Image (cartoon, helix red, strand yellow):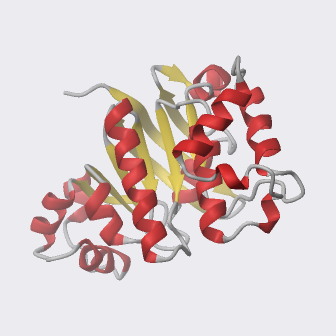
């Protein structure tokens, strides 16, 4: 069995009377892309927040790279990173300034060289002197991806990485991420509403609804279990509650 780089046991988060995440258990394999799927309010973003140490769990345990996140998260986070189109970099700073800040936060010895290399690799060298707030959605996505890769992470957490992008830019992002994962062996946890993206990129899938993991498996196994042709159809079955027996398969 492949090494488990993320292990979650009995993880819960309550906000007042709202149980956002309800005693979930899952693992993420080294070198695999794992999809974390569910409708709005399913608990995906809260789960990612707890994995990053930004949200304190109400109960449960998170182990990343063999370390307890509640006790040793700063050492873990040196080898992880995160990207989301819903989290903006400071608009008034230039692209170079923003990326340099993150390179220094991660303690890179030659931050200027790393920023330049990523700009070349991601094809935005011409944007380095631009203020980040002036960029288009596609340009911001490339810069956000560079931020997420600044420390060459072993674990990459992605929240809707291609949201609001045109098909050509979204395809470019997917191909780049797949190439990075294959070349480095990094583990990727991907939250997405794009089921074609999930079928194309994911080795494993976790399906959430109302804070619980309802089902899990490879895309092919889930398609077979639900008797469907596409992951979008599986997603709709689960989102609409047409998932008899799913909890038994997930347990």
State the image coordinates of residue 49 (x, y, percent, origin top left).
62, 48
Q: Is residue 176 above or below residue 118?
A: below
At 74% across and 49% down in the image, what residue appears?
128
Q: Quadrant of the N terminus?
A: top left
Dividing the picture into quarters, in which one does residue 239 lie?
A: bottom left
Q: Residue at x 77, y 44 (%)?
A: 96
Q: Looking at this view, name the residue that lies furthest to the front.
A: 126
Outermost residue toward the right? 92
The image quadrant of residue 127 is bottom right
In this view, 235 is above or below 128:
below
**Residue at the extreme top:** 109
190, 64: nearer the viewer: 190
The answer to whether residue 79 is seen in the rendering is yes
| Image location (x, y in percent) of residue 134 | 80, 67
The answer to whether 111 appears left or right of 182 in the picture is right
Residue 151, above or below 211: above
Q: Position of residue 250 (x, y in %)?
A: 25, 53
The answer to whether residue 187 is left or right of residue 50 is left
Residue 48 locus on image (x, y percent):
56, 49
143 relative to 194 in the view: left or right = right
**Count of labels shown?**
0
The residue at the point 67 percent across, 28 percent down is 113
Q: Nearer the viewer, residue 160 or 115?
A: 115
Q: Is residue 248 left or right of residue 137?
A: left
In depth, the one of 209 and 54 nearer the eye is 54
Q: Kindly tell me whether residue 209 is visible in this rendering.
A: no
**Placement of 169 over or under 232, stated as above or below:** above
User: Which is nearer the eye, 230 or 12?
Assistant: 230
Answer with the quarter of the image where residue 107 lies: top right
């Amino acid at each position: 069995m492949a090494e488990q780089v993320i292990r979650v046991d009995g993880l819960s988060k309550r906000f007042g009377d709202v149980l956002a995440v309800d005693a979930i258990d899952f693992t993420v394999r080294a070198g695999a892309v794992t999809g974390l799927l569910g409708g709005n309010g399913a608990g995906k973003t809260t789960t990612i927040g707890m994995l990053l140490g930004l949200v304190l769990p109400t109960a449960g345990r998170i182990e990343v790279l063999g370390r307890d996140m509640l006790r040793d998260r700063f050492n873990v986070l040196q080898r992880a990173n995160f990207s989301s189109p819903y989290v903006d970099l400071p608009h008034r700073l230039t692209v170079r300034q923003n990326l340099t800040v993150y390179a220094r936060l991660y303690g890179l010895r030659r931050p200027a060289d790393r920023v330049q290399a990523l700009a070349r690799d991601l094809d935005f060298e011409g944007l380095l002197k631009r203020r980040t707030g002036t960029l288009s959605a596609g340009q911001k996505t490339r810069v956000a991806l560079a931020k997420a890769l600044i420390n060459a992470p072993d674990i990459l957490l992605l929240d809707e990485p291609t949201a609001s992008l045109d098909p050509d830019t979204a395809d470019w992002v997917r191909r780049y991420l797949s190439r990075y994962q294959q070349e480095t062996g990094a583990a990727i946890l991907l939250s997405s509403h794009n089921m074609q993206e999930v079928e194309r990129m994911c080795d494993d899938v976790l399906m959430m609804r109302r804070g619980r993991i309802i089902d899990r498996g490879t895309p092919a196994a889930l398609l077979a279990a639900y008797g469907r042709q596409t992951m979008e159809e599986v997603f709709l079955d689960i989102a609409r509650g047409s998932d008899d027996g799913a909890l038994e398969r997930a347990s």
